[in-house]
Image (cartoon, helix red, strand yellow):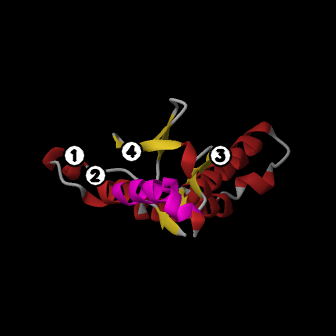
Amino acid sequence: MNVYRNPYYRSAGIILVLIGVVLAVADRSILAGFPDRESAWRIAVFLATAALGVGMFLIRVVATAETLTIRNLLRTHVLPWDAIAGFDLEASLVVELKDGRRIGCSAVQPTGLDRMTGRKGYAGTTAELLDARRRMSASPESRSL
């Protein structure tokens, strides 16, 4: 199993969770007037901040022998290798499916410098590794093992 992710998203996720918790603890007016509408909105904002942080922490692409799992902020896709036609790099890694659909992977994005200079970078290397794994899983020799 290989896991690919943007390391900055993990840090940003932790920071957002901490911001939500610190703001909720520091805001004493929430407990003072809880049943009112303003307190409910504040609690909702703090919870949404923490939930966004948890979501960002969990963004990743996981490649196993049988499937490719793409965990974006709001949706998770589990794809068998034989459903994948290839990979493309745009603003993020894009999985091209044989049925014509395209799924973006928020976890793997080329840096601006990589795009300007045409370097492969982490995102390009990840796309090549995933494509090699896809080709290996499609070969008849790998299925007989």
Whichever of labels 4 and 2 marks the residue nearer the N terminus, that label is: 4
Q: CA distance from mark 3 to mark 4?
A: 28 Å
Q: Quadrant of the N terminus?
A: bottom right
Q: Residues within 10 Å of mark 2 (few under 14, many from 20)?
A: some
Task: Determine the image quadrant of residue 14.
Answer: bottom right
**Discs 3/4, front:** 4
Write down the region rendered in magenta.
128-143
Q: Residue at x 37, y 53 (%)?
A: 127
Where disc 1 sits, the SS reads: helix
The residue closer to the viewer here, 26 or 145, is 145
The residue closer to the viewer here, 10 or 60, is 60
**Discs 4/2, front:** 4
Q: Give the amino acid at mark 4.
A: Ser
* Disc 1: which residue: 115
Q: Is residue 80 above or below residue 7?
A: above
Q: Give the amino acid at mark 1.
A: Arg
Q: Residues within 10 Å of mark 4 (few under 14, many from 20)?
A: some
* Disc 3: which residue: 45
x then y, percent, for residue 35? 85, 45
Q: CA distance from mark 2 to mark 3?
A: 31 Å
Q: Are marks 1 and 2 in contact (CB under 8 Å)?
A: yes
In the picture provided, is 32 more to the left or to the right than 134? right
